[in-house]
Image: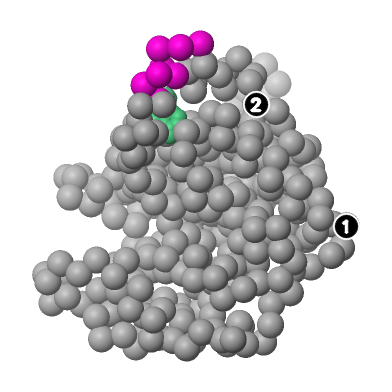
Amino acid sequence: MTSDLDRLIGIFKQARQEVAKIIIGQTEVIDQALIVIATRSHALIEGVPGIAKTLLVRTLARVLGCDFGRIQFTPDLMPTDIIGTNVFNLQRNEFVLVKGPVFTSFLLADEINRAPAKTQSALLQAMQERTVTIDREQHGLPDNFTVFATQNPIEHEGTYPLPEAQKDRFMMKIKMDVPNREGELELARRTLGPDAPEESLAAGCVQCVLLESDLATIWEGLQGVTMREQLLNYVVDIVRASRQHESVLVGAGPRATQSLLQASRACAVLAGRDFVTPDDVKAMVLPVLSHRLILRPEYEIEGISIEEVIDRIVQGVEVPR
Ligand SMILES: Nc1ncnc2c1ncn2[C@@H]1O[C@H](COP(=O)(O)OP(=O)(O)OP(=O)(O)O)[C@@H](O)[C@H]1O
Ligand SMILES: [Mg+2]
């Protein structure tokens, strides 16, 4: 194993430990978020209010030494509210750039579907290009620019659901489930004690495990993870099977293949390995595909869940030995 990769494995391990000082349980969610960050991607986060979506991203920023910013999307939010604008300064008699909140490393875009398409696409463009254009001038975003976007459930009135094509830009959808009874009891205890999660974070109880500038090079370390030819085939076949499955109206595009490959590699590193196994791929299929498939209406009416469909898709593809 190369020393770069060794270091990477160590950083992941420490990061997990530090985040766990604040976030109770949610281990899979923490791993998925680390995978998204390590691969320089973006994620959707889904979960009921008060499940610690905001706290998770803030904690990750602290642990990885990155800036954190948040934008609450509203129906009247304008693209310039996100990217920034040139403002005329009377004293200096010139225009000065006022940077918008996208100029940060970890950005939580809360309730992204509450803003109209024009505003959403300003963010999506920034995600894709990692630059923004303000009055025809290009400005680069920080190296670690990573968006975590939350969505309001679609049933809510007055929302603008993200078009499928836009969802594809997110590497994965991280689903946060409510904690089990034990976890909730732990939260209850901590809330009344000296180590309440919010207060612990504010009091500096977590350690920063690396410099922000180091994080930008982490993904280069991932290049050292090997993936056998059979596993490449496995990934390609799974994504292709998603397009052919009887219950699927629209399957995943080629970007899903890339996301699944990268996520599987990072997943291997989290497990302390320098090679990918079929289980890494399997673990990443659901988060990578779940927001990219549209089921046929007749199946949706039947009440089949996306998890079940993806499970069937994976089962239909032969696992390489
Ligand atoms: N798993 C958990 N670990 C630690 N604290 C938790 C956990 N789940 C909930 N909490 C507590 O719930 C509080 C609310 O979390 P937070 O504000 O991050 O939720 P949210 O998911 O962003 O909610 P909203 O959708 O309303 O923005 C946290 O400050 C924390 O005290
Ligand atoms: Mg929140």
Q: Can residue 63 be spotted in the picture?
A: yes
> Percent position (x, y) of residue 184?
35, 30
SS state under label 2 = loop
Q: Residue at x 70, y 28 (%)?
A: 207
The yes-or-no answer for disc 1 within 8 Å of ligand 1 is: no
> Percent position (x, y) of residue 299?
17, 75
Amino acid of disc 2: Val
> Percent position (x, y) of residue 166?
42, 62
Quadrant of residue 292 within the rendered picture: bottom left
* Of the pair 141 and 214, the residue shown nearer to us: 214
Quadrant of residue 64 within the rendered picture: top right
> Percent position (x, y) of residue 258?
58, 73
Amino acid of disc 1: Ser
Q: Quadrant of ligand 1?
A: top left
* Of the pair 248 and 180, the residue shown nearer to us: 180
**Inter-mark Cα distance, 2 to 1:** 26 Å
Q: Residue at x 48, y 48 (%)?
A: 29
Residue 48 relative to residue 267: left or right: left
Which residue is farthest front? 182
Q: Does 189 appear in magenta?
A: yes
Residue under pointer 1: 3
Residue under pointer 2: 206
Q: Residue at x 51, y 84 (%)?
A: 319
Q: How many labels, in total?
A: 2
Going from N to C along the chain, the mark reached first, 2 or 1, is 1
* Highlighted range, magenta: 187-194
Check the image and tell me how it is coloured: one colour
Q: Residue at x 53, y 53 (%)?
A: 32
SS state under label 1 = helix
Which residue is farthest right? 3
